[in-house]
């Protein structure tokens, strides 16, 4: 599997009090943390915009 070039990250927006999405460009990819229930990625360790970040995503068992 090739490393991703962008990730659709999820974050909590305090203004709207809801989950929002943002596509984050990936400069370097350093793996992921998997959900202990569905075993799918729930966060990715990346370098983006010159700094290391954790990009959270909805895992397969997340509900709206």
Image: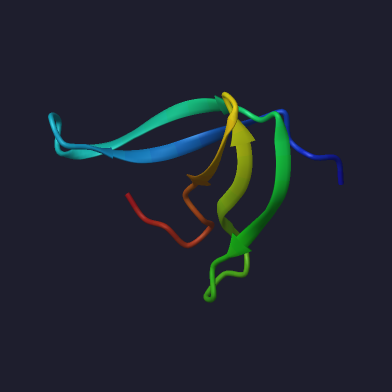
Q: Is residue 60 left or right of residue 20?
A: right
Most distant residue in the front direction: 50
Q: Residue at x 54, y 27 (%)?
A: 24
Q: Residue at x 44, y 27 (%)?
A: 22
* Residue placed most toward the observer, 23 or 53: 53
Most distant residue in the right direction: 1
For the image, the number of numbered tags is 0
* Residue placed most toward the observer, 28 or 21: 28
Based on the displayed image, in which of its 4 quarters is residue 16 positioned?
top left
Based on the displayed image, in which of its 4 quarters is residue 15 positioned?
top left
Based on the displayed image, in which of its 4 quarters is residue 33 positioned?
bottom right
Q: Is residue 15 left or right of residue 48?
A: left
* Residue placed most toward the observer, 48 or 15: 48
Note whether 59 is above or below 50 in the view shown: below
On the image, the x and y values in percent for residue 19 come to 29, 39
On the image, the x and y values in percent for residue 47 come to 63, 36
On the image, the x and y values in percent for residue 32 come to 65, 56
Q: Is residue 40 left or right of residue 28?
A: left
Q: Residue at x 35, y 40 (%)?
A: 11
Note whether 22 is above or below 3 in the view shown: above
Most distant residue in the bottom direction: 36
Note whether 30 is above or below 24 in the view shown: below
Q: Residue at x 48, y 37 (%)?
A: 9
On the image, the x and y values in percent for residue 4 come to 73, 35
Q: How is the image coloured?
A: rainbow
């Amino acid at each position: 599997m090739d490393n991703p070039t962008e990730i659709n990250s999820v974050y909590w927006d305090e203004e709207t009090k809801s989950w929002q999405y943002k596509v984050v460009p990936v400069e370097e990819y350093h793996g992921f943390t998997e959900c202990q229930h569905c075993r799918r990625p729930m966060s990715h360790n990346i370098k983006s915009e010159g700094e290391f970040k954790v990009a959270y995503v909805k895992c397969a068992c997340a509900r709206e």
